[in-house]
Image (cartoon, rainbow, N blue to C red):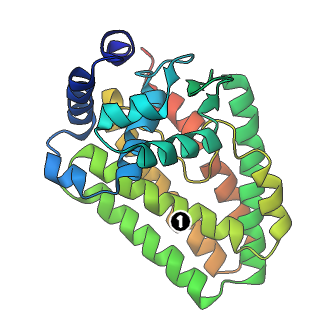
Amino acid sequence: MRYFWIHKYENAHDKVHAFEQVWIRKWQGQMTTKANETAPSDKRVLAVLHRMIMDGSLAPGSKISEVSVADMFDVSRTPARLALRALEVEGLIKKRDGRGFTVQEFNLGDIKHAYEVRGVLEGLAAGTLAKSGMSKDVEATLKSVIKDMDIALTDTSADGDKISRYQDGNVAFHETIMRQCGNDYIGYAFDRMESLPMLKLGTVVFSADKAEEDMMRLRLGNMQHRLIFDAISKRDPQRAESIMREHANQTLVYSALFAGPDD
């Protein structure tokens, strides 16, 4: 499965489209074509490409372009272009000298170090917001997205649909705290490293092969969201910063912890 599309289907429109459907079913279980079409084309393309890169279906060094992506998803080049731009901003692909992009290599050591710095910045943002206090709008937003993430993880829809909705809430939670904490320089500092792979605020990493463990990790993550919100609400900057720093590192630390001794 890992290199199926890259080696076998890259020049065949009908077979590439068939691969997309197989891959989506792998990730999203019983999700119907109709349900999939309700999402905007660029977001649908982005979500699937993002997961393909994360699980290795698009291996480091693989070449992709607007044309190949448009053919793969049977969409126009505009949503393909928007999705590729978003992946480039996130640091998952890099523009080639000619046309198209190349999937980036992951240097896990660099990513780990970047996560440590992100944890410091996100912790500082949470502590600063706790110290200065939330506006009513910020409070309402954080409450709402925490509730949305709870709903996303407890409903009966397919895993892919759950993760997409959880991702939306997770981005909103982290972006709100970072951008509304009252110190713009924290956000400015973070912006300089946000293009590294998986460092974008709210990025959710999910493996279909370890769905149970990853769902457990996401539920724990939203419990931490509640604890962070509680600390900010109670104007406890030290607690808010400490929990946020722990939470910001959860993708790497908890993924390894829940993987088990055989992985």
Position of residue 179 measured from the top left corner of the image (x, y, whole percent): 70, 69
- Quadrant occupied by the C terminus: top left
Left or right, 22 with reference to 247: left
Q: Residue at x 74, y 38 (%)?
A: 114
Q: Quadrant of residue 147?
A: bottom left
Position of residue 197 measured from the top left corner of the image (x, y, whole percent): 63, 35
Farthest residue toward the bottom?
A: 136
SS at mark 1 in the image = helix
Against 64, residue 85 (above or below) is below
Position of residue 129 measured from the top left corner of the image (x, y, whole percent): 73, 75
Q: Identify which amino acid the numbered label 1 is placed on.
A: Ala
Which residue is under mark 1? 172
Q: Quadrant of residue 211?
A: top left
- Quadrant occupied by the N terminus: top left
Q: Residue at x 32, y 43 (%)?
A: 75
Position of residue 22 measured from the top left corner of the image (x, y, whole percent): 21, 28
Viewer can see residue 50 = yes
Against 212, residue 225 (above or below) is below
Left or right, 98 with reference to 163: right
